[in-house]
Amino acid sequence: MKEYANVTYLNHPVLTHKIAILRDKNTPTSEFRTVVKEIAMMEGYEALKHVATKSVEIETPIEKTVQPMIVGKKLCFVPILRAGLGMVDGFTALVPTARVGHIGLYRDEVTHEPHEYYCKLPEGIEDMDVFVVDPMLATGGSAVDAIKMLKQHGAKKLHFVCIIAAPEGVEVFEKEFPDIPLIVGALDRQLNENAYICPGLGDAGDRIFGTYRY
């Protein structure tokens, strides 16, 4: 796999352990949902490490002090519906004051191409650090379309965070947006003939919302 300056592949034993739980087809919906949130929090620590802070004066039980704090209103988390919703709680647990937008895309079952059906973003998106979240980066089509939509709405400081990616999706994303940071929890082997990631974990949205049949 080609190395990219703006791609970060996370490699932590706790993270890989939790991703293994997601992969297991016997993991029930309730546990799957909880683990997705936990993974999102872990990835959030990495993704948010460069966000801006401001100096704020506070008073400890001992004395007054000036400390750096994140400006939550300058952050926006944007899940790609519907699977991306599973990652939002993990990110907002880290920064509860962050704004949340939504982008709705669905995949054509024949062409595997994404189609837009919803977009709702907070005012001032052009001045925010925007983190797009989606559990899977497969063909890269949905990720690319989501970023293009955000750019059309004025977003400038963009990042993309996924749990599992296929090499094909990373290639497409980086070719289109070589300047946008991409955070990947696990890089899998390849896509199959139905554009599912192998070994992957199946359809993340179905498993988060309990609509799968295996």
Image (spheres, rainbow, N blue to C red):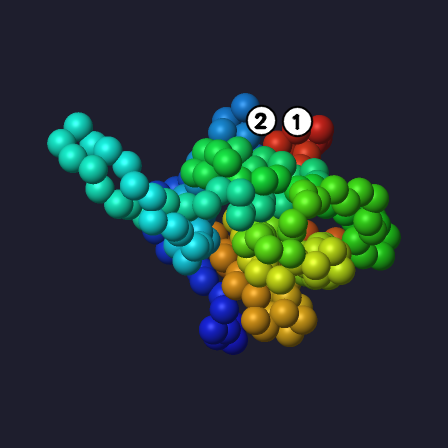
- Residue 3: x and y in percent read 48, 74
Judging by the rendered image, the residue that carries numbered circle 2 is 29
Alpha-carbon distance for marks 2 and 1?
A: 6 Å
Q: Residue furthest right?
A: 110
Whether residue 7 is visible to the viewer of this picture, yes or no, is yes
User: Quadrant of the rendered structure where residue 101 is?
Assistant: top right
Residue at image position (65%, 49%) is 124
Q: Please identify the residue farthest to the left as the structure is shown.
A: 62
Classify 21 as above or below 114: above
| Label 1 residue SS | loop
Q: Earlier in the sequence, mark 2 or mark 1?
A: 2
Q: Residues within 10 Å of mark 2 (few under 14, many from 20)?
A: some
Q: Residue at x 24, y 33 (%)?
A: 59
Count every numbered label the image shows and give the total.
2
Q: Are marks 2 and 1 in contact (CB under 8 Å)?
A: yes
Q: Is residue 183 above or below residue 207?
A: below
Which residue is at the front of the view, 178 or 54?
54
Q: Is residue 98 left or right of residue 194?
A: left
* Percent position of residue 191, x then y: 65, 59
Mark 1 highlights which residue? Answer: 210
**Nearer to us in this view, 58 or 114:** 58
Q: Amino acid at mark 1?
A: Gly
The correct choice, above or below, for 79 with respect to 206 in the image is below
The x, y position of residue 151, in whole percent, is 70, 61
State the residue at coordinates (77%, 45%): 119
Mark number for residue 53?
Answer: none
What amino acid type is highlighted by mark number 2?
Answer: Thr
Q: Is residue 80 visible?
A: no
**The residue tagged with tag 2: helix, strand or loop?**
helix
Tell me: 49 left or right of 164: left
Q: Residue 70, how many percent across, how many down?
A: 41, 46
